[in-house]
Image (cartoon, grey):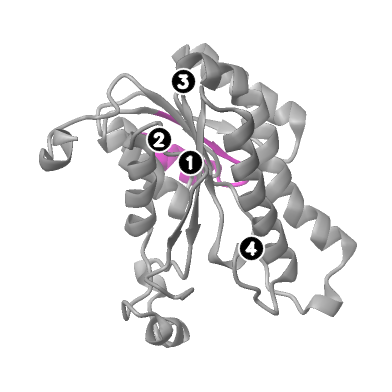
Amino acid sequence: MDWLLDRNAKPLAGKTALVTGAAKRIGKGIALALAAAGADVAITYRGSAAEAAGTVAELQALGVRAQALACDVGDEASVQAALAAVLSEFGALDLLVNNAGAFETAPLEKITVEQWDAMFSTNTRGPFLVAKAAHAALKASGGRILNIGSLGGVHPWATHAHYCTSKAALHMLSTTMAKAWAPEISVNCIAPGMIVQSEEVGAAYQQFADKTPMKRNGTVADVAAAALFFATAPHFITGQLLAVDGGLGL
């Protein structure tokens, strides 16, 4: 792991990654971190075409190949078309980051069946469908899957029942994938805590920072660094859930 000491090293050179829901926020940060480490990167988006185009330009500026694909991760045909396009463009797939996710606040007793199903379609069914579609390519490359879960999948949040439950299911799916698809594919999961963008920092988020042992909220860079760890760590590490929360969940 000498490359960790060399800022010019490209540990992912020659590798191809797919990051779902990466037009902005955490997904974009992960995609840029992987590209900076040398990986060619494909991203998917659903409704953020303009942002996706901008992210592709930023990825290409890092000297790697990049593409953006419209994809509804909850729709099997859409997922299969996106994976086919990635393999057509890059020829192989080494890393899948299931980042696309939905978030919503609602009192438990007022959550509708439609809200419940929509949350699970993106947060749980989506990673299942994308991973299933990518399975053969990842098996061939001895690749990796990284699912982006949530601290809410570990701790119950009273006004986010459908979100918390969908992420808890994703955590279990991650460990099941790890066991089912070993030894060819390693599968791990990150559970971010309170992650804020610079423009979001303010009084509304200070309460979470005050409750966090590290005395600040998390950043996209924190999650991206954890993703880069799993992308480059020994393939032997699998089935792990890593909280990136500054100790908020303790």
Nearest to N terminus: mark 4 or mark 1:
1
Q: In which quadrant of the rendered view does residue 11 lie?
A: top left
Point out the frontmost of discs 4 and 3: 3
Q: For the residue marked with disc 1, what is the amino acid? A: Ala
Is residue 21 located in the magenta-colored stretch of the structure?
Answer: no
- How many numbered marks appear? 4
CB of mark 4 within 8 Å of CB of mark 2?
Answer: no
Q: For the residue marked with disc 4, what is the amino acid? A: Phe
Residue wearing tag 1: 52
Point out the frontmost of discs 4 and 1: 4
Residue wearing tag 2: 56
Q: Could you tell me how far apart the alpha carbons at marks 2 and 1 are, in whole angstroms?
A: 6 Å
Point out the frontmost of discs 3 and 1: 3
Q: For the residue labelled by badge 4, is the local secondary structure a helix, a strand or a loop?
A: loop
Residue wearing tag 4: 103
Image position of 108 (left or right of 57): right
